[in-house]
């Protein structure tokens, strides 16, 4: 019996598929199902995609047993990963640059925010006569934790106005009710924090906002370009060892990013833990609306974002040599691209 060329091609296709299938299965299998994610202030809208990925079961859908451990600030979460008690950080993008400057290679692989969402406000109680940034000299400024992104944002703001970080005192106040109490009771003179903390204090007319990065327009005005913010990042060694785990994490986070963009503040407020609302659901919903533009729609890092982050970091970190940083090694959109292919309309 003669076999036609078409039949031969069909047989070759079947054989090729049979040979390829085991490889596909291996590529999709997780190196480990257990992953610990350290976050500095889970209740913040800044980290909302992480919470949604956990609450909606997106990590589980990817076959992961993800344990989220909450810390007072991003710098504390970073210490957990560097110290080996966590695998991945949910933190500020610029930490990857700072780590490389110290010889530690970490890479961001999925974005949660495309603007910092950090707001700097002065206490109307302690500083009723505030007029210019120069008035901050000698004052106590509350940040989520020393060394965190809130600390970095204030330092950059100070540098823009001729002040040094050493001209003020930075006080760690966390990212929840403790931060609000610190401002209310006069323990600090100003505060750099995120929502819902900032919206709570603004509603009480307790602060005068002097710098705001909750919108893309204001972020570009302050930083001179797109400034990536919350992301998942981990060591390059972890990525090399667990590429399928990293892909699974990116898949879950992209689904969360898209779910948030497609949902109303009412829908989001109903699923987050009650503690996130700080006792005022309606205020939380307003904060969600005010920050929605700053949350990533698809997990991608903007092309100019890494350069903006590098420029900002170099502006206030003493003796920081930006010329020694290889930006190509601190971020990638490869995992996010595959995640968007898998969940185009998640």
Image: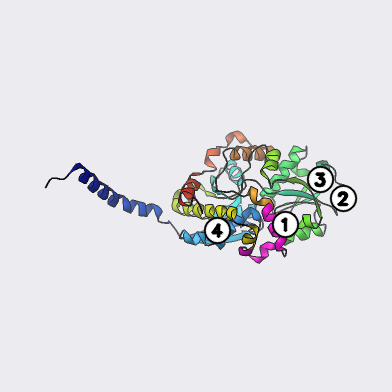
Question: Residue 206: horizontal and vertical position, in percent?
Answer: 81, 55
Q: List the residue tagged with mark 3.
A: 136
Badge 1 local density, few (<14 within 10 Å), some, or many (20+)? many
In space, the residues marked 1 and 2 are separated at their CA atoms by 20 Å
Farthest residue, direction left: 1
Residue at the spot x=70%, y=56% of the render? 286
In space, the residues marked 4 and 3 are separated at their CA atoms by 39 Å
**Quadrant of the image occupied by residue 309:** top right
Q: Is residue 165 visible?
A: yes
Q: Is residue 316 visible?
A: no
Of helix, strand and loop, which mostly describes the magenta segment?
Answer: helix
Q: Which structural element holds mark 3?
A: helix
In space, the residues marked 4 and 2 are separated at their CA atoms by 42 Å
Q: Using residue 94 as the reference point, say whether residue 332 is left or right of it.
A: left
Residue closer to the observer: 276 or 173: 276
Whether 247 is drawn above or below 131: the answer is below
Badge 2 local density, few (<14 within 10 Å), some, or many (20+)? few
Q: List the residue tagged with mark 2.
A: 128
Question: Residue 68: horizontal and vertical position, in percent?
Answer: 57, 60
Q: How is the image coloured?
A: rainbow
Q: Is residue 285 magenta?
A: yes
Mark 4 / mark 3, whichever is N-terminal: 4
Q: Using residue 211 as the reference point, say whether residue 24 is left or right of it.
A: left
Q: Which structural element holds mark 1?
A: helix
Q: List the residue tagged with mark 1.
A: 197
Magenta region, residue range: 270-289
């Amino acid at each position: 019996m003669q076999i036609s060329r078409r039949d031969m091609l069909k047989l070759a296709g079947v054989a090729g598929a049979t040979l390829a299938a085991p490889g596909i299965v291996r590529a999709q299998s997780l190196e480990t199902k257990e992953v610990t994610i350290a976050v500095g202030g889970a209740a913040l809208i800044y980290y909302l995609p992480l919470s949604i990925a956990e609450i909606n079961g997106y990590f589980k859908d990817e076959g992961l047993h993800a344990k989220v451990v909450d810390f007072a600030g991003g710098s504390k979460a970073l210490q957990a990963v560097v110290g080996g008690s966590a695998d991945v950080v949910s933190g500020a993008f610029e930490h990857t640059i700072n780590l490389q400057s110290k010889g530690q290679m970490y890479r961001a692989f999925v974005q949660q925010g495309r603007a910092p969402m950090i707001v700097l406000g002065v206490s109307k109680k302690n500083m009723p006569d505030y007029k210019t940034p120069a008035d901050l000299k000698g004052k106590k400024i509350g940040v989520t934790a020393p060394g965190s992104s809130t600390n970095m944002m204030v330092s950059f703001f100070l540098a823009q106005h001729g002040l040094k970080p050493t001209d003020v005192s930075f006080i760690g106040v966390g990212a929840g009710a403790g931060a609000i109490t610190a401002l209310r009771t006069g323990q600090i003179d100003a505060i750099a924090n995120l929502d819902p903390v900032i919206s709570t204090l603004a509603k009480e007319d307790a602060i005068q906002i002097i710098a705001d990065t909750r919108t893309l327009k204001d972020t570009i005005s302050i930083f001179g370009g797109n400034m990536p913010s919350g992301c998942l990042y981990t060591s390059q060694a972890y990525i090399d060892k667990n590429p399928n785990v990293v892909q699974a994490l990116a898949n879950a986070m992209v689904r969360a990013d898209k779910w948030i963009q497609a949902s109303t503040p009412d829908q989001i407020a109903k699923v987050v833990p009650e503690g996130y609302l700080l006792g005022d659901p309606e205020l939380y919903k307003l904060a969600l609306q005010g920050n929605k533009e700053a949350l990533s729609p698809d997990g991608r890092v903007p092309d100019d974002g890494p350069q903006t982050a590098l420029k900002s970091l170099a502006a206030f970190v003493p003796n920081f040599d930006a010329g020694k940083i290889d930006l190509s090694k601190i971020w990638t959109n490869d995992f996010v691209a595959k995640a968007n292919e898998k969940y185009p309309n998640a």
